[in-house]
Every structure is written in structure tokens, then in C-alpha cells.
Amino acid sequence: MTQAPAASKAQLFDYRQAANPVRKGLSDPIPYRQWGPELHASGPSGVIPLDLSAELGAEGPATSPALAAHYIRIAGGEGVKAAASATSSLFFVLSGRGLCHRGAQGNCAATSLNWAAGDLFVLPAGADPLLEAAETSVLYWVHDAPLLHYLGVEPSRPRFEATHYPAAWLQSELQALAADPSSARSNRLSLLLANSDLAATRTVTHVLWAMYGMVPAGATQPPHRHQSVALDLIVACQSGCYTLVGTELKADGSIHNPERIDWQAGGAFITPPGHWHAHVNESGAPAYLLPIQDAGLHTYLRSLDIRFIG
Ligand SMILES: [Fe+2]
């Protein structure tokens, strides 16, 4: 490395020293990490960040370079503000019911919606929403504030409208998909949540991607990979469900030397970008998962690079 004279911060690196700075001590690779449901099973009302910001060199709570995932636990009759400078906030209700409301701010409209267990809703940039629980509730919350921190920007306008995906609709559509004979040939038995304002990406917001999926009893899904990070939430499962993750495939299409991540209902884990992953259900009951990714952004950048085996 060559340093410019005087007070300049200009540097020059031999290409070989700086061509791939994704390595330990520079831009650390995104790690495997898992969080259990005990994090939100008890305790006072509040936001519980799944925070890897120190490892990632990110500012503020961050679970991946662009996204931050949290649990929000709210005692019945209490409220929690979900404060973040973000362009996209996604909430999935693991348990309970309540009300989300926020006032108008600038060109961002006021929002008021009722939520209940199994619902998913997304909010664009705007005032901090207040989540009020009618009974003790747990929500999974993912937003893109780490991306905005990195860019050094504040959101200036909403890019979509607040949108609600009720539990009954998600469940009935997923059951209909499972009953469709053509689903037997599908790599994933899943619904991709989309928004008619975002026709080009077919994603839940312009940054976030969300999938509501089922892994049937006895199923082993063939591996796939993509350059988006997945912050996976396990909605429901019995013992014996897991994800295999690794960077290489064997000649038979299975994952070479995989990491095994055992599922827990209400637990969460990271699938790093570019890693092959396959879900396995050795329990006797269907299992349900909700991966949240930055695949809206990757789709816009044409960098998703999704690949399938089988
Ligand atoms: Fe995936």
C-alpha cells in the first residue's frame, strides 16, 4: 500500500491486496447465527435486536449489512414504538393481537391497522409506528436502516403504501398451493408476497422480499442459492426440521460438508449470501417458515443470481 504525501487520505493498493476485501478483519463475511424463542418468551415490553453490528462493522443494530431483524415483545395493554430511519419495515405477528398506528409526516400518510397472530404487514418510510397490544404479543420486525446508515442518507418519501397480508389469506392460499398437483414438482412450496405498486420486482417492498413457505412432513428440498441474505423466521415446526447450508455442492447435487441449523418454532437464523441451502423436515407434521431478504434491492440491481438444483 502506498500513502499519498502530506495530509491527503488518498491511497493506492496493488490490485492483489484489495481486489477482494471480504475477509476476516476487513469486510468480515456474514456469519452463521441462530436465535432461539427463549429471547421473546418472557420479559418486559421492548424491542430485542438480533444484533451483529460489531462483527459486521455496521452502525446501529444490524443482522446483515443492509437489514436489521428484531423481536418485539409487548405485554397486553402496553405499547412499543418501532423506531427506525428505514425505507421499509416488515412485521410478522408470531402471537397476540393489537393495533399499529402512526400519524402523517411530510408526504407520508397516517396509518392505522389491526394485527393478529399470523398477519404480516409492511410500512414505508414515515413516522415511527406505535404498536399497541390488546393481549401479550410477539412480533418479528425487519427493516433496512443499516443500508441507509451505510449510505449516510435519510428517507425522503414513501415508495409504497402500508400493506397488510392477513393470516387467513396467507394460510388459505398456501393450503391451496399445497393441494395443487403441480406443486409436487416445485423446488419450494411457498408464496412470495408482492405489491401491485412494485410490479417489476414482485417483492413485498422495493428493498425487502418475503416468502411464506411450508416444508411438508418427510420433505427434503433440493438446494438453491442467491446473493441476497435471508433472515429466516421459523413460524411453526415440530422437532426434526433443519436447514443444511454450505458453499459447495457435491457431484450428486447435495451440499458438501454442510452446517446443520436445527429449527425451533419462533426462532430465527441467517442464511449468508451465495450459500447453498436445503430445508429438511423429518418430523411428522408440516413446518412453516418466513425468510425475509434484501432481494427486492438485489432484483433491482440485477445481482440476485438465484440458482437451483433439481
Ligand atoms: Fe433461499
Image (tube, helix red, strand yellow):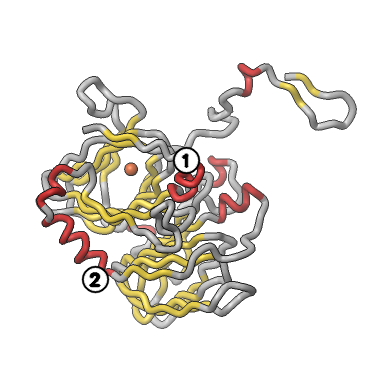
Residue drawn at x 24%, y 71% as measured from the top left: 168
Identify the residue shown where x is 39% and y is 54%. 202
Secondary structure at numbered mark 2: helix
- Is the distance from the Cβ of mark 1 to the nearest ligand 1 atom less than 8 Å? no
Q: If the picture is divided into quarters, which one holds ligand 1?
A: top left
Q: Residue 184: percent from the left, percent from the top?
A: 13, 45
Residue identifier under label 2 = 168
The quadrant in which the N terminus is found is top right
First-in-chain label (1 vs 2):
2
Tell me the residue at 40%/43% (across/down): 33
Name the residue nearer the viewer: 281 or 191.
Answer: 191
Task: State which quadrant residue 307 falls in.
Answer: top left
**Total numbered labels placed on residues in the image:** 2
| Position of residue 219 in the picture relative to residue 36 (left or right) | left
- Of residues 92 and 203, which is closer to you in this image? 203
Query: Is label 1 in a helix, a strand or a loop?
Result: loop
Identity, as a three-letter code, of the amino acid under mark 1: Arg
Q: CA distance from mark 1 to mark 2?
A: 33 Å
Query: On screen, 63 above or below 98?
Result: above
Residue at mark 1? 302
Pick the quarter of the image with the C terminus: top left
Mark 1 packing: few (<14 Cα in 10 Å), some, or many (20+)?
Answer: few
Q: Residues within 10 Å of mark 2 (few under 14, many from 20)?
A: few
Q: Residue furthest right?
A: 6
* Residue 262 sits in quarter: top left
* 232 with respect to 243 (left or right): right
